[in-house]
Image (cartoon, rainbow, N blue to C red):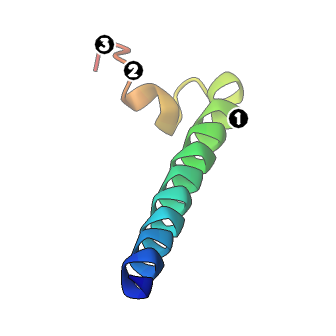
């Protein structure tokens, strides 16, 4: 029973870390967006290319 609980906690931590990473990437893209329209953030949002 204890092993199962430990695994669940470990999995939760991993999922939270992945979400945090995604949020940080999105925040970085949002910060880059307005200042550099030709930067990395516009490559994925269909500016014609």
Q: What residue sits 69% from the left and 22% below the top?
A: 34
Residue 45: which numbered mark, if any?
2
Q: What residue sits 42% from the left and 68% below the top?
A: 11
Front residue of this view, candidates 21 and 45 = 21
Label 3 CA crowd tier, 10 Å (few <14, some 14–19, many 20+): few
At numbered mark 3, what does the secondary structure look like: helix, strand or loop?
A: loop
| Image vertical order of residue 15 relative to residue 33, above or below | below
What residue does disc 1 label?
A: 31
Label 2 CA crowd tier, 10 Å (few <14, some 14–19, many 20+): few
Front residue of this view, candidates 7 and 26 = 7
On-image quarter of the C terminus: top left
| Mark-to-mark CA distance, 3 and 2 | 9 Å
Label 1 CA crowd tier, 10 Å (few <14, some 14–19, many 20+): few
Marks 2 and 1, the one that precedes in the sequence: 1
Residue depth check, mark 3 versus mark 1: number of the one nearer the observer: 1
| Image vertical order of residue 26 relative to residue 43, above or below | below
Q: What residue sits 30% from the left and 13% below the top?
A: 48
| Image vertical order of residue 31 relative to residue 49, above or below | below
- Relative placement, left or right, of 48 versus 43 is left
**Residue placed farthest to the left in the image?**
49
Place of residue 40 in the rendered image (x, y in percent of width and height, measured from the top left)? 48, 38
- Relative placement, left or right, of 8 versus 48 is right
Place of residue 39 in the rendered image (x, y in percent of width and height, measured from the top left)? 53, 35
C-beta proximity under 8 Å, tags 3 and 1: no
What residue does disc 3 label?
A: 48
């Amino acid at each position: 029973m204890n092993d199962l609980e430990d695994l669940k906690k470990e999995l939760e931590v991993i999922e939270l870390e992945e979400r945090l990473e995604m949020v940080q990437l999105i925040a970085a893209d949002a910060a880059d967006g307005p200042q550099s329209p030709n930067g990395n953030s516009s490559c994925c949002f269909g500016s014609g290319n």
